[in-house]
Amino acid sequence: MAGDGDVIVVGGGVIGLTTAVVLAEGGRRVRVWTREAAEATTSALAGALWWPYRIEPRELVGAWSLESLRVYEELAADPVRTGVRVVAGVHADVRLDELGPWAQEVAGLRQLPPGEVPGGYAAGLGARLPLVDMPMYLRWLRARLEAAGGVVEARTVRSPAEAMVGASVVVNCTGLGAREWVPDPGMRAVRGQLVLVENPGIDTWFTAADEASSETTYFFPQPGRLILGGTAEDDAWDLEPDPATAAAIVERCARVRPEIAGARVLGHRVGLRPVRGAGVRLAAEAGPAGVTVVHNYGHGGAGVTVAWGCAYAVAGLVD
């Protein structure tokens, strides 16, 4: 579909970097143009547990998620370098028979009796899943891209036309920025607030995330910290942490693990999930002068979960 020119990937979060890695390792000359370094993106703030959460369309998400799962399971063999570990935990208020067909291909998922679900929840699912230390993982991703010959350039790209100059393929991984960049008015922010605390000795993760509620409860043990969450506030764009919200997050998590109540607070974080009303946009279209534009954005709360599957799909559209 494309010619012999460079591939320009616009966006340097986990979606953009993963897509760039797959294309570069497939023999393409790849440049990532990003307004901000990966550690300053929304991706760096993610929890980040592998699980299809707040993402559509469901008929595609399962396959993308499973492809990514296989990659993370391999990367977990070298956690010190990649930041990926396989960790045990519980999804409260989740029933195995209510999940999609993809769940049958995730080894070790098991329905728990109420007595084994912490926090007094009536149902829950036990699992061992990849948990990603995002700052470390994003550094590793960039290094893998550079090892494959790709480059990352700090550059603000105001329109698709700017990226098309000298490129045969432009891949749009702008996330929430697609609202103006495409433009796509269907993009909206779902605000997530987190609290980072000293880990009081917790080595398992926990989630209770009703997708119909703006309040969620979860904690993820990461090196040097325990990440507490959270919120899912639809169409909320405020990046300032709210003290009352932070206190409520700690209180909810402490109902599940009381030792969290006394943990020293290390910091607060706010990220905006890039949600698209029609679901992920992953499609190619013909641009001017023979340039192919591939869109890969709108991954909601599951960018890490589907990153590799979506990147392979992009590669299929480019080749």
Image (cartoon, rainbow, N blue to C red):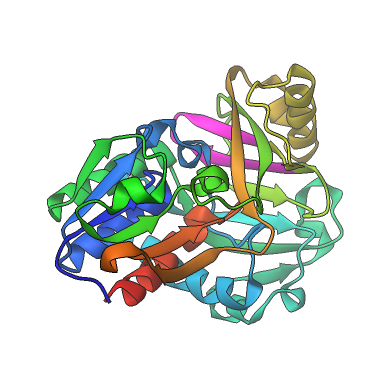
What is the quadrant of the C terminus in the image? bottom left
Judged left or right of residue 208, residue 266 is: left
Can residue 78 be seen here?
Answer: no
Task: Give above or below for 114 relative to 132.
Answer: below
* Nearer to me, 285 or 119: 285
Task: Give above or below for 254 relative to 174.
Answer: above
Judged left or right of residue 279, residue 43 is: left
**Residue, far front:** 289
What is the quadrant of the N terminus in the image? bottom left
Q: Position of residue 18 (x, y in %)?
A: 34, 56
Q: Position of residue 254 (x, y in %)?
A: 76, 32
Residue at figure coordinates x 64%, y 66% from the top left: 56
Residue at figure coordinates x 74%, y 51% from the top left: 209
Q: Which residues are magenta?
A: 217-229
Residue at figure coordinates x 69%, y 58% from the top left: 277
Task: Give above or below for 189 relative to 74.
Answer: above
Q: Position of residue 231 (x, y in %)?
A: 73, 38
Residue at figure coordinates x 37%, y 69% from the top left: 314
Q: Is residue 258 magenta?
A: no
Query: Principal SS element in the magenta part?
Result: strand
Q: Position of residue 4 (x, y in %)?
A: 14, 67
